[in-house]
Image (tube, rainbow, N blue to C red):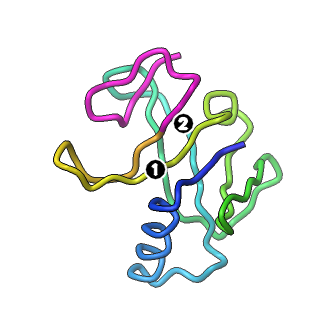
Amino acid sequence: MIFITDIAKDKIAEIRQQEGHSNQHNIRVSVKGGGCSGLMYDLNFDAEIYPQDQIFEDKNIKILVDKKSLLYLLGTTLDFTDGLNGKGFQFVNPNASRTCGCGESFAV
């Protein structure tokens, strides 16, 4: 399962509206190679659901994850912060053994 904090849920709704996406546009979370720690998170809106997708729902937000990425993301919580140390979405991933300072890449 992938979880979303209340703050992230509100920010997703705000960005969805600003960018003109409908409620048919779900959140797609994936993992790609790269970054200073070896793996990077990718977060986008997507109206397409593919056969290999796992679909989770938390706080009325549908989250799409491909099976390969799911291995790295199980139990992850998507959060949002706008504090002094940076602004943006953050992934609280219990599977990550190491993360970079910017929080955008990780290693397992």
The prevailing secondary structure element of the residues shown in magenta is loop
The quarter of the image holding the N terminus is top right
Please name which of the two marks, 2 or 1, marks the residue nearer to the observer: 1
* Image side of residue 67 versus residue 99, left or right: right
- Residue 79: give its label: 1
Secondary-structure class at tag 2: strand
Q: Is residue 81 above or below residue 40?
A: below
Q: Residue at x 49, y 74 (%)?
A: 13
Q: Residue at x 47, y 28 (%)?
A: 33
Assess whether residue 101 is covered by the magenta stretch: yes
- Residue 31: give its label: 2
> Residue 77, image x and y in percent?
56, 43
Looking at the rendering, the stretch of residues picked out in magenta corresponds to 92-108
* Image side of residue 18 versus residue 30, left or right: left
Chain-order first, disc 2 or disc 1: 2
> Residue 106, image x and y in percent?
43, 25
Q: Is residue 55 above or below residue 14?
A: above
